[in-house]
Amino acid sequence: MEEIMEILKDLDWSPLYISIKTGIVATVISFFLGIFAARKAVKASPGKKAVIDGILTLPMVLPPTVAGFFLLLLFSRRRPFGEFLFDEFGFKVVQTWLGCVIAATVIAFPLMYRNARAAMEQIDVNLVYAGRTLGMSEIKIFWEIIIPTAGPGIASGTILTFARALGEYGATSMLAGNIPGKTGTISQKIAMVIQDGDYLTAGIWVAVVMVIAFAVVVLMNLISGRKMKNIRRW
C-alpha cells in the first residue's frame, strides 16, 4: 500500500488529462457527424446506402495501425494535403494533440454512426407522417420527433464512442506519436510502462480507465433510463 501511495504521489497525470480531453472532443465531433451521416444513409437508396455504409464503417473493421498509416500518409507535411494545411492554415497534425483528436475521431466515429443509423431505422414512419400532417418542417420533425425517439440508441452510440476514443492506441501512436505532456494518452502510457516492466504503475492506470468508463456508462444509462421513463408516461 505504501508503494502504491508513493507512486500516486509522484504520478504524472497529464495522460489522464490528454485522454479525457481527446475523448470528449472526438465524441462531440463524432456525435454530430454520426447523426448527420446516419440521417443521410437512412434516406439513401439501397445501393447508395451500401456504399456509404461500407465507407463509413471501414475504420471499425481495419486494424487501428492500418487506419493510422493512411492518416499519416494523408496529413504528413511530406504529402500535398498535409503541406497545404500547414502552409495555408498553419495546421500541423502529425505529432500534435490535433492528431490525437483526428485519430480518435476516425476510429470511434463508426460506432456513433452505426448506432444512430440503427436507432433511426427502427422509428415508426407513422410518427414522421403525423408530424408532416401537423405542418411541421423536416428540420423540426428531425429534432423533435426522430432524435428523441432514437435517443436511447444515440445515447448508446455516444457511450461506445467515448469509450473507444478514450482507449484508442494504434492510430494515435502512428499519427500523433507518444510525446509526454503533449500527445501521450493513458493507453500509450500503459504500453510504455509495461515495456519497462513497471506493472504496478500500469495497473494504476488501468484502474483509472476502468473507473472513468464505469462512471460514464452509469451516467449515460441513468440519462437513457430517464428518457425512456418519460416516454412510457407519455
Image (cartoon, rainbow, N blue to C red):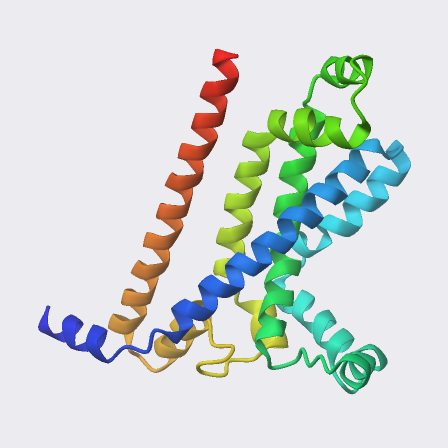
What residue sits 47% from the left and 76% below the top? 184
In the image, 143: left or right of 155? right
Which image quarter holds the N terminus?
Answer: bottom left
In the image, 227: left or right of 175? left
Q: Position of residue 54 (x, y in %)?
A: 78, 47
Q: Is residue 187 above or below residue 109?
A: below
Choose top left, top right, bottom left or bottom right for residue 203.
bottom left
Foreground residue, 90 or 78? 90
Q: Is residue 103 above or below residue 39?
A: below
Q: Is residue 119 above or below residue 106?
A: above
Q: Position of residue 94 (x, y in %)?
A: 65, 80
What residue sits 44% from the left and 34% below the top? 223
Q: Position of residue 66 (x, y in %)?
A: 68, 67
In the image, 142: left or right of 132? left
Residue lying farthest to the left in this orientation: 2
Q: Position of residue 28 (x, y in %)?
A: 59, 53
Choose top left, top right, bottom left or bottom right for residue 17.
bottom left
